[in-house]
Amino acid sequence: MKSNFLSKAVSTYNKTSLILRIFIGIVIGALLGILIPSQQWLGFFGNLFVGALKAVAPVLVFALVTASLAKGGAKLDNRFRTVIFLYIITTLLASFVAVTASFLFPQTITLVQEAETTAAPTGIAEVLKNLLINAVSNPIDSLIRANYIGILVWASLFGIALKSFASESTQRGMSDIAEAVSKIVRWIINLAPFGILGLVFTTVATNGVGIFKNYSSLLAVLIGSMLFMSFIVSPLIVAIILRCNPYPLVWRCIKTSGITAFFTRSSAANIPVNMELCEDLGLDKEMYSVSIPLGATINMDGAAVTIAIMTLAAAHTLGISVDIPTAIILCLLATLGACGASGVAGGSLLLIPMACSLFGISNDISMQVVGVGFIIGVVQDSLETALNSSGDVLFTATAEYKSWLQQGKALPEFLKK
């Protein structure tokens, strides 16, 4: 009898929408954080969830890219160049949006008393050096440290090498390994509601429900800039390229990819979700199996927004005047930093001191800004990941559909509405 009940419970759980399950987890986590904040063991579910995602995501990227290139790298044609262009240009546009928003709605920050002491890049030369060093880092070390730049480089080399001499059975074996790792990630994401419950509980129990009160204005500028990119800038680019109403595609990407990424807070862990969505959109697997993992590494619109806005908030706090030429340089710096953010411990936040150095802000002060970033990261990082991850599919699909038009093929029916 107990077995039947458990079986029915599991079946009902799996049949329920993941988004609904996650929403229930958020509500329960918040209530438990308010009612029984002393039960810190509940936060362990969140630690397990985040730990599992961090552990499997680097392996997933390596396996997917290696398998894709080993099996069929020959189809990385003009579509792939279009995807790379869209990844980079939208990251640059995101930094311009963020800088403009900061000029229109200047923000200041109440700096904490103690600064973080974590090392961070201090200039553009160091960022470039870090990118090159990370690119040639030991592949095993890259997997252990989640150095996605290094993972991407070594996976590409392994994949190209295997394609040149490996048998069909070996290539098929690599594809099976990639599929197995993807399956594991899907299992972990299926348990996301329990992990989200633990994360929300810890946040509410530790900081209270008013955690964001002191930073509501700063959060509003961050959120507004990211939403502007999601619903105005990116759709406009898609509309120009495909000459159609972009919102059916934009909404589908946000609904399927963005919402899941918002809660998992990991572009790499969201790769299987994006791959499945690409399949549903009718895209070429040999194309998206490379462009999606690559996007999880270098398509960083949200990171560019965070770096630019937080840096200018620090400048405004210290009364530093920012002129137009300097703002333009900041945009370029934020774009470069965002593309390399995944190769730096701590993600986009630890690129803030590098950008702050442009205004002569000391590392001691800029690391305090990083501390503020970690406080608001529950919302900022979630939305940043949602923007980044949904964009991976959006621009991959745009490049694919552009090639369809060039070949005289019709766009999918849902884009003709």
Image (tube, rainbow, N blue to C red):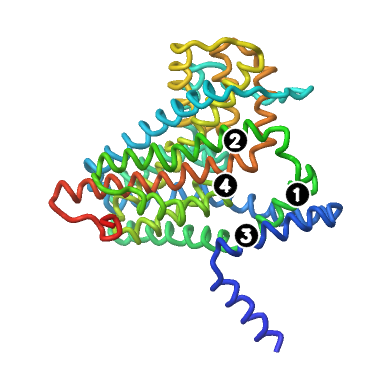
Which quadrant holds residue 146?
A: top right
Q: Where the N terminus falls, by quadrant? A: bottom right
Whole-percent x and y of residue 119? 64, 23
Asked if disc 4 and disc 2 are in contact, CB closer than 8 Å, the reply is no
Asked if disc 3 and disc 2 are in contact, CB closer than 8 Å, the reply is no
Counting residues from the start of the chain, the first of labels 1 and 2 encountered is 1
Tell me the distance, in whole angstroms, between the alpha carbons under discs 4 and 2: 19 Å
Q: Return the mark for residue 397.
A: none
- Local crowd size for mark 1, using a 10 Å CA cut-off: few (<14), some (14–19), many (≥20): many
Whole-percent x and y of residue 409? 16, 55
Q: Judge whether 34 appears above or below 116 on screen.
A: below
Is residue 164 visible in this depiction of the protein?
no
Please state which of residues 54 and 195 is positioned toward the viewer in this rendering.
195
The residue pinned by badge 4 equals 265
Q: Residue at x 68, y 54 (%)?
A: 48
The residue pinned by badge 1 equals 202
Whole-percent x and y of residue 324? 45, 13
Residue type, numbered disc 1? Thr
Residue type, numbered disc 4? Arg
Q: Residue at x 51, y 31 (%)?
A: 305
The residue pinned by badge 3 equals 23
* Farthest residue, direction bottom: 1
The residue pinned by badge 2 equals 220
